[in-house]
Amino acid sequence: MADADHGGGQPAEDFGATAPGGARARLRVARVGLWLIAAVLAARQVAAVLGTPRGERLTDLETWVGPNGVLHVNGSLYDSTRFTGTPFGGLVLKPLTRSAEQALGWGWTFGTLLLVVALGVIAARALPRPVSRRTALLAAPVAVSLLMLSLPVRSTLSLGQTSIIPVLLVLLGCFTARGQRTSGLLIGLAAALQPTLLLFTPLLWCTGRRRAALATGVTFAVGTGLAWAAMPHDSHRYWVHHMAGAGLGGPADDLANQSLHGALLRLGLNGPLEIALFLMLGAAVAILALRRAVRYFHDGQLLLAVAITGCAAIVVSPTAWQHQLLWVLLAVVGIAGTRAGDRYVWPVVVVLVMTLPAGMLLPDMDALHPLRDNLVLPAALAAATAVPFLPRGSPFYRSPKPTAYAPAASRARFRHVPLLPSLRRALTRPNLLLELLLLRVTYAAYSQVRLAAGGGGNSAGRGEAEEHGRQIYDLERVLHLDIERWANHTVVGIGWLRDFLDQYYTSFHFFVPLAVLAVLYRRRPGDYRWARSALGFATLLALVGFWLYPLAPPRLMPTLGFIDTVHGVQDFSQPDYGTLTALTNQYAAMPSLHFGWSLWCGVVIVVLAARWWLKVLGLLHPLLTLASIVATANHWVLDAAGGAVVIAAGFGLTYVLQGPRARTAAALAQTGSGAAAVRDRTAR
């Protein structure tokens, strides 16, 4: 398999003669920078592991080789279910002794780190030909960085697991081994450590690598047989009693088990029905995945074929713990989508699923729990059976359908605008799945940063927030803007007005911006990108404000006599707002994004709406929001001013970086073309 048509690490020097000197220099700088990033990420992971107190780091390794570790205790390895490896894995690890434990911790961590680097380099060199010079130089550090960020590698480093070794053995057997027997030997050793990797045997056989397939089977049988001869009782318990490891390391229905078996158990199935369904579905997945893998192998995409087979191994395994899920990340090499705008969906989905916790990708809603609890499994299933990866013969493999862009404006209001002309205004609609996914991740990150800005809780930083509240109140009195108490007490005395403003405050903050974005996405995609970018920049600037200036709103200033009309009377040291208490920082008041987002909606509606009554509604929304945040004692007037500033800065940054919005740029380009034509006619 090693001599199949793949990237094979075409030397970067082969490209050097044709690349301009400036381009070569920029590529060298980019390459060094990416390797520095990879080194920083690696150092961070090592520091996180070795900086953890003894007893909390390398817990699996300690379980195996510690003073009472299962590898040093007479009896079965599986008495406590703490050892999850195969008997062959236990046989290999048994020589490790307690006397070497301290050195072993450091050695194991740095050794695992080197294995990760080797894995990234081999995967980068295995990219299918032809590859550009930029890809050849930059793929390796990017691959290593992604591996360092991935949850499986982080879990492997912190637990002291061996799950990197089978993946590396398979890649070595596929891409570096010389001769089919050597290739089969390496893959057979990987299968002896992780039995579901025997799926590579039919892949080898069906792709004409029959000697390698036979060597894989023989190596697996010999390794397993040696372990059975040395540890017959353990081998019987692992292969017969535990069904090739099922139930080891924790209950099979644990959330960490991302195999099909674990998902079926979490869905409430059990007993013979669950086993029969698991076997049938697993067989169907394996057959379909192998057919796809063989097709992509013959297409010259060997790394993708290997990744598809590895993803199928995850699905059909009785247990697939987090540290064993690295195959999904390798599937990022597949190219899906005929449009340029769709090309990024699959790699972004894979990277997010493999680097972020499920809580950041999906909200905590009961209806989404089945998907949220099994998030890696759908990604593995999709890679193995469903994602329509493009063959290299497709006309869209190297040249997807281009994105339509607005013409560059021939003139702008300011000389150096846009600062980033490469970020041209796209006219086509972006991919909806990608937009929704990035929106969710951005909002989850925004919520975490907003909460952290207050010290991680509502009681943290109370004194500083109240001192800032007094500063704002004093400044408003100097400016004669201190209308909050008058408005608050006036509204409290008018029941219907109080109910209306309370409802407006709680309901329209998210609904109206999402509605505006949805309408723009459907009917004005070019303007959608402009408006979305402005909102994103404004929200990032607001996070900086929350971090630098925690501020108590009027309702949390106990000496000023404000009435919290929305939440009721509160304990100021421990405010209780139901589920919001654990999710939001109540001292993130400056700037007010309630007003800022409403002002963004108003500006977008006024600029883009064609009908006068829509423009009026657009103007009313920020005015009503201002009334609601002040009258309900949730914000100071100056908070609203801060919200207006960040929104103005958001639109300003969007203009400075990308220039005028798409329609304006097109009009300016057309005007410039017309003026040039007039000048030409005059010159004649």
Image (tube, grey):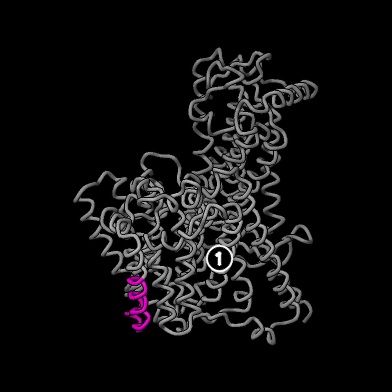
Residue under the image location 30 percent in, 56 percent down: 233
Q: Give 308 or 223, whichever is nearer the viewer.
A: 223
Please identify the quarter of the rendering in which residue 216 is found: bottom left
Please identify the quarter of the rendering in which residue 141 is found: bottom right
Magenta span:
203-222
Residue 439 is at least partly visible in this image: no
181 is within the stretch colored magenta? no
Residue under the image location 48 percent in, 84 percent down: 178
In this rendering, is residue 41 above or below 674?
A: above
Residue for badge 1:
115
Residue under the image location 76 percent in, 57 percent down: 413
Please identify the quarter of the rendering in which residue 570 is found: top right
Residue under the image location 65 percent in, 41 percent down: 543
Image coordinates for residue 254, horizontal then vertical, percent: 37, 45
Image coordinates for residue 8, horizontal then vertical, percent: 53, 81
In this rendering, is residue 516 above or below 338?
A: above
Image coordinates for residue 153, horizontal then vertical, percent: 52, 57
Horizontal placement of 274 versus 356: left or right? Answer: left
Question: Within 10 Å of the Cα at label 1, are there few (<14), some (14-19), or many (20+) other Cα atoms?
Answer: some
Horizontal placement of 286 versus 644: left or right? Answer: left
Q: What element carries label 1?
A: helix
